Every structure is written in structure tokens, then in C-alpha cells.
Image (tube, rainbow, N blue to C red):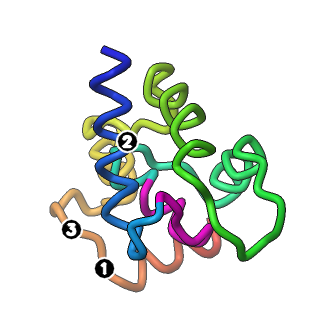
């Protein structure tokens, strides 16, 4: 199963490896991680980068730095999306009129004030 996970990670990494030299721009890491079905916030992406031992901000990540960290993330099932039923329950709590929709104004209010 580890070999299968490593293959999946390598394939995702290669999509962003524009020079085909086993490196990607450090700014692409969040996109790669999310393309693998994980959804870390930006602070968690920075923690992953720290684990990959990035020497210089704005630099590049080598596949050999990325692979072990992401293999561990996928094996531990970290950063999985929130289950649909939890999201639906949250939406229903915001839908005060129980009409199946939320106005833009109400959504903005809930996201910025409450």
C-alpha cells in the first residue's frame, strides 16, 4: 500500500514539475497537497514545509523532500475534508428560515461577525 501511495504522490508532484527535474516551486505545495485530497489550512501547509526542510523561502522543493512527508500524511489520513453531513448541519443552522438557501448578506454577516 505504501508503494501505491508513493506512486500517487509522485504523479501529483510531476504535474507541477514544469522543468521535469523533480522539483517544484515551494508556492505549489499547497495545491499539490490539496490535489491529493487533503485540505490543510495555510498554517498547516507551512508546518508541512518546515518538515520538508526548506532552506530558503521562495525556493524549490525536491520530490525526495516531499515524498516521505506526504506519505506519512496520507497514511495517517491527516487533513481529510469535513464530512458532508457536518457541512449540511452547519448550513441548516445558518438557514434560519428553513428555506434551503442563505442570502449573500446573511452569509457575509455570519462569516465576518459571528
5 falls in the magenta region: no
Q: Residue at the location (41% across, 85% down)? A: 105
Asked if disc 2 and disc 1 are in contact, CB closer than 8 Å, the reply is no
Name the spot of residue 49 as percent of width and height, x first. Answer: 70, 52
Residue situated in front as seen by the camera: 71 or 23: 23
Element at badge 1?
loop
Spatial distance from mark 3 to mark 2, Cα to Cα?
Answer: 38 Å
Quadrant including the C terminus: bottom right
Residue that mark 2 sits on: 9
Asked if disc 1 and disc 3 are in contact, CB closer than 8 Å, the reply is yes
| Label disc, if present, on residue 103 of the rendered structure | 1
Residue situated in front as seen by the camera: 74 or 1: 1
Neighbours of disc 3 within 10 Å: few (<14), some (14-19), many (20+): few
Q: Which residue occupies the extreme left position in the image?
A: 99
Q: Residue at the location (31% across, 79% down)? A: 103
Q: Residue at the location (57% across, 42% down)? A: 64
Element at badge 2?
helix
Residue 42 image-quadrant placement: bottom right
Q: Where 39 sits versus 106, above or below?
A: above
Residue situated in front as seen by the camera: 41 or 27: 27
| Label disc, if present, on residue 91 of the rendered structure | none
Q: Where 98 sits versus 88, above or below?
A: below
Name the spot of residue 17 as percent of width and height, x first. Answer: 41, 67
Neighbours of disc 1 within 10 Å: few (<14), some (14-19), many (20+): few
Name the spot of residue 76 as percent of width and height, x first. Answer: 50, 20
Neighbours of disc 2 within 10 Å: few (<14), some (14-19), many (20+): many
- Specify the segment rendered in magenta: 22-32
Question: Is 75 situated left or right of 60 in this image?
Answer: left
Element at badge 3?
loop
Helix, strand or loop for the magenta stretch, by majority: helix
Amino acid at each position: 500500500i505504501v508503494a501505491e501511495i508513493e506512486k500517487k504522490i509522485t504523479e501529483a508532484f510531476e504535474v507541477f514539475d514544469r522543468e521535469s527535474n523533480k522539483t517544484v516551486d515551494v508556492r505549489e505545495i499547497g495545491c499539490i497537497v490539496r490535489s491529493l485530497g487533503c485540505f490543510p489550512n495555510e498554517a498547516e501547509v507551512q508546518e508541512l514545509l518546515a518538515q520538508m526542510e526548506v532552506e530558503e523561502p521562495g525556493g524549490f522543493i525536491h520530490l525526495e523532500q516531499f515524498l516521505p512527508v506526504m506519505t506519512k500524511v496520507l497514511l495517517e489520513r491527516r487533513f481529510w475534508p469535513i464530512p458532508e453531513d457536518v457541512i449540511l448541519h452547519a448550513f441548516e443552522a445558518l438557514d434560519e428560515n428553513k428555506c434551503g438557501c442563505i442570502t449573500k448578506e446573511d452569509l457575509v454577516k455570519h462569516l465576518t461577525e459571528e
